[in-house]
Image (tube, rainbow, N blue to C red):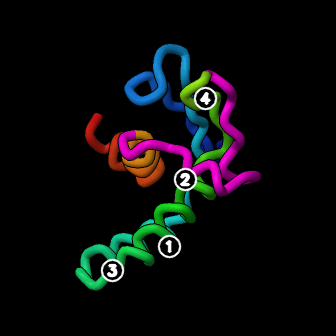
Amino acid sequence: MPERLNTFTEPSEAVQGPESWVKFRRLPYAMIQAARRLIESGQITAAEDERQTRAIIQQAVAAWNWVDDEGAPLPQPATDPQVIDRLNGPEVDWLMAHASGQAQAKN
């Protein structure tokens, strides 16, 4: 019997330095398509874009070993959604590219 691969781990040294990683859950197709349709419609508001980004990160990030600027471990987004506010732009962009599968498609 096959085993469904619902998670994958990616090294994240590009945004968090050596030995950093993020374990992602694979997102449901319906969630990805809804976000794509909203973006392609050109009618997405800044508030809706932020809501979608937060929802995707919270659902997709199963675990990480990320740290803040002082080297203290950041809480997991699923248990502390406010941690997303502490991330910088490149970190959020990296998470979104990997969570949506865009980064894997480029490889």
The residue that disc 2 covers is: 85
The residue that disc 3 covers is: 44
Q: Earlier in the sequence, mark 3 or mark 2?
A: 3
Q: Quadrant of residue 33?
A: bottom left
* Neighbourhood count class around disc 4 (C-alpha, 10 Å): few under 14, some 14–19, many 20 upward: some
Q: Quadrant of residue 21?
A: top right
Q: Which residue reaches farthest top?
A: 18
Q: Secondary structure at mark 2?
A: helix
Instruction: Check the picture and name the quadrant holding the C terminus.
Output: top left
Q: Amino acid at mark 1?
A: Ala
Query: Could one spot residue 52 in this view of the protein?
Result: yes
Q: Residue at x 45, y 68 (%)?
A: 50
The residue that disc 4 covers is: 67
Q: Mainly helix, strand or loop, the magenta region?
A: loop
Q: Residue at x 44, y 47 (%)?
A: 92
Say the numbered circle drawn on residue 3: none
Magenta stretch?
71-90
Separation of marks 3 and 4 at Cα, in angstroms: 31 Å
